[in-house]
Amino acid sequence: MPSSLHNRIFLMYSLLFVLVLTIASVIIGVYAADNINRQAAASLDAYSENVGNQVRDKFQQMDRVSTRILFSQNIMDIISEIIVNYKGNQNYFDQNRDKFNVVFQNFLVILGLDISNTIINIYNEKAFISTSEMGVDWRIIRNAAEWGLLADIRDNLKKNPNSPLLAGPHLPYWIGGVNTQAEYFSLSRRLYDLPTGRDLGILQVLKKRSEIESLCGSSDETIRIYLLDADRNIINHYSDDGFIPDAQSILAEYSEGLNSGRGAGGEDYILSFRKIDGSDYSIFVMQRYHSGLVFVYFGTILIAVVSLLIVTVSLNLLVSRYLTRPLDEVINAMQHVTRDNLEMNIDFHSSTEDLKQLQQFYNEMLSRVKEAMNQTLQSRLNEREAYYLALQSQISPHFLYNCISSINSIAYENDVPQIADICELLSNMLRYVMKFDLENSTISEELEYTCNYLKLMQIRYSNEFMFAVHIDEKCGACPIPRLMLQTIAENCFKHAFINTPFPWSININIFSEGDTWTVELIDNGCGIDTKRVERIIGRSQALFDNMLSGIGEMHLGGLGLLNSITRLRLLYNNKIHFSARPLYHGTIVRFGGEMHEGQIYRSDS
């Protein structure tokens, strides 16, 4: 048998490599150019995606700064006071330097180390404040608000008041006609009082044009990276840039057909175009095409294949002899092991070191298989017991659901719409929690359930409680343990709002950053005990680490914070993040996991 096996191995591998060489020699000349074009285009697409992500991150960083300002209670209280009480015609902050210092210090805290690269402006009809070191003339600001940049921003924000407005590059309007080379990209939001909805003006976060354009630099002289505006005009320019005429010509030619992620090998250039998520800007990358690379590629591959064939055929003769000698001994020993005889340990009686290791590993594998079979049996018993308990517990929810439906019908008949609304919200919540066969859900489904709960809280507290929700659609299909978000929201009423006067507010933001999704919940309560949260996170990690010791030892009953974090770890194999820390007024809780491409969770599966 060893001789026959040796001959078959030698013949099979020899024929395989001859076949590979023949096929490669035939097709390499035909597809070499196309392969290089595809590789170069893919590389260029990855390059443009990386640059686009960096620019997007800068814009998102500006958006996060604006969001933090919106939730800064000190700043919002001062701006609200100006709108309500100030009657003067001059800039309020010119007349009240103490208030200027308070707002400016809050700006510095929010910006942190980024103070030299970012400017914050707040404008309304009675006040203007800026972190710019240059002087500000109130008359210039009023002119900009009447027919200048501020007027355009105000008009555009009215069309979509709940979304940020990204603009630029533009000159610093707050210093008037001063000659300057500094231009800015700006992200503007409508400034409003969260409890009352009163319009407080315009909030702007600005980055220097040079900082954004620096992300579009390239050390490769054959590559040019251009930042395009909504009309596909080139924003950034290189010194002595000979690409510009060709770039403008290509952009004009493909005004409608140049799509995101398209790598095109033309006569002179390889191209890549990519939209920047969340904005009207785009990244356009050009690289000069060199046809000589095709011949270099062809020659290198051909020489490598021939050399590999010669070396492999020679080694194949020696390796096949070496491999087939101990295989017969291995096969004979393994034939004595069957599914019903897992207690048997194999002894190869061989002095070969690798076979001794194989013997050790195989015996350990038999032990693990036996242990796994026992654990599987126990797991199925536990699953069956849980199934019967779930069937038993379904009786009560079904009865409650039918009762609520009856109350809802009576409320409609007697024209009591608030009771009908409460019944509808409770019915939706019961319908969600009655899915006993599902342990996990999607972020969008969990968010809908939590919103029903928060609407009930609004009714309970007579509109002294408000909440706001913002979700990135890309995160909606990501899986999440059921009732996790609602549990964290409920803790606000159990703990954060107990000693906090009305009004109460909760803001939920769901967004993606790179390959991760994040759920962010911000309240205006009394804060949180960070040491207690750290202990809960530590216990959750310990439970996950001890998971293999058996489900019976993991007492995860209840829907508290410990249970929620541990279930999230199990769902994402511990690749999660969770944090909770106090704010000046309130608490911010963040948690999330990896967002893989194509990741979809279906609740009806």
Image (cartoon, grey):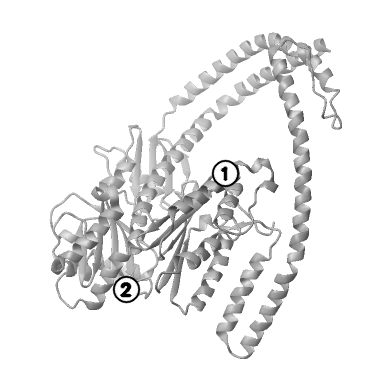
Pointers 2 and 1 in contact (C-beta within 8 Å): no
- Please tell me which residue is depicted at 25% across the width and 50% down the height of the picture: 115
In the image, residue 386 above or below residue 539: below
Task: Classify mark 1: residues with Cα within 10 Å, few (<14), some (14-19) or many (20+).
Answer: few
Return the mark for residue 199: 2
Horizontal relation, residue 454 to residue 554: left or right: left
- Please tell me which residue is depicted at 40% across the width and 66% down the height of the picture: 524
Looking at numbered disc 1 in the image, what kind of residue is underneath it? Ala
Instruction: Estimate the x, y position of residue 242 in percent, counting from the top left.
Output: 29, 37
- Along the viewing direction, whichever of 500 and 16 lies nearer the viewer: 500
- The C terminus - image quarter: bottom right
- Along the viewing direction, whichever of 354 and 472 lies nearer the viewer: 354
Looking at numbered disc 2 in the image, what kind of residue is underneath it? Asp
- Please tell me which residue is depicted at 66% across the width and 40% down the height of the picture: 548
Task: Classify mark 2: residues with Cα within 10 Å, few (<14), some (14-19) or many (20+).
Answer: some
Say whether residue 175 is visible: yes
- Along the viewing direction, whichever of 247 and 373 lies nearer the viewer: 373
How many angstroms separate mark 2 from mark 1 (CA)?
49 Å
In the image, residue 197 above or below residue 252: below
Q: Tag 2's secondary structure?
A: strand
Instruction: Estimate the x, y position of residue 575 in percent, counting from the top left.
Output: 54, 44
Instruction: Estimate the x, y position of residue 431 in percent, counting from the top left.
Output: 66, 69
In the image, residue 33 above or below residue 145: above
Instruction: Estimate the x, y position of residue 428 in percent, counting from the top left.
Output: 62, 71
Say whether residue 153 is visible: no
Q: Tag 1's secondary structure?
A: helix
Return the mark for residue 320: none
Return the mark for residue 542: 1
- The N terminus - image quarter: top right
**Residue that sits furthest to the bottom in the current view:** 414
